[in-house]
Image (spheres, helix red, strand yellow):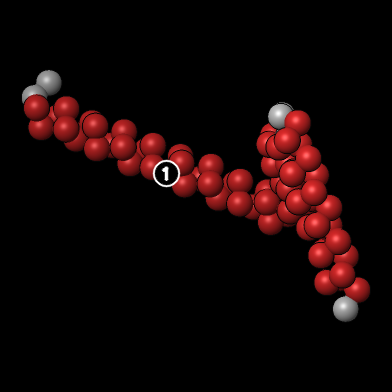
Amino acid sequence: MSELGILEQRLQLVELSASLQRATIERRLAAVEARPSRTLINLIGSVASRPIARQLAFAAAAFAWRAFRRRRRT
């Protein structure tokens, strides 16, 4: 295979990789938009592996929940 053929094949692989990454990002964004609270809970759970981080994560979650409820009432 010539050098030009190898470069064309690499270009096709890069384009395929970029399109797959784009599709993955779009799918994840759609999931976040569909259920933002689940995404927040998952994020807090992943951060909460250490005791200090767990306390901060729960405090942040409680703050976000109160803000959400206040905003929803008005």
Q: Residue at x 78, y 58 (%)?
A: 64
Q: Quadrant of residue 4?
A: top left
Q: Residue at x 33, y 41 (%)?
A: 15
Residue identifier under label 1: 19
Q: Residue at x 39, y 37 (%)?
A: 17
Q: Quadrant of the N terminus?
A: top left
Q: Residue 63: percent from the left, percent from the top?
A: 80, 57
View extreme (front): residue: 52
Viewer-closest of 1 and 19: 19
Q: Residue at x 53, y 42 (%)?
A: 24
Viewer-closest of 34 and 16: 34
> Measured along the vertical axis of the image, is residue 43 above or below residue 50?
below
Q: Quadrant of the C terminus?
A: bottom right
Q: Is residue 4 visible?
A: yes
View extreme (right): residue: 73
View extreme (top): residue: 1
Q: Amino acid at mark 1?
A: Ser
> Measured along the vertical axis of the image, is residue 72 above or below residue 60?
below
What secondary structure is marked by label 1?
helix
> What is the crowding at mark 1: few (fewer than 14 residues within 10 Å), some, or many (at least 20)?
few
Q: Relative to 72, is 57 on the left or the right?
A: left
Report how many numbered discs are placed on residues in the image: 1
Q: Residue 71: percent from the left, percent from the top?
A: 83, 72
> Measured along the vertical axis of the image, is residue 35 above or below residue 14?
below
Q: Is residue 45 visible?
A: no
Q: Residue 18: percent from the left, percent from the top?
A: 38, 42
Q: Residue 53: percent from the left, percent from the top?
A: 71, 37
Q: Quadrant of residue 68?
A: bottom right
Viewer-closest of 22 and 48: 48
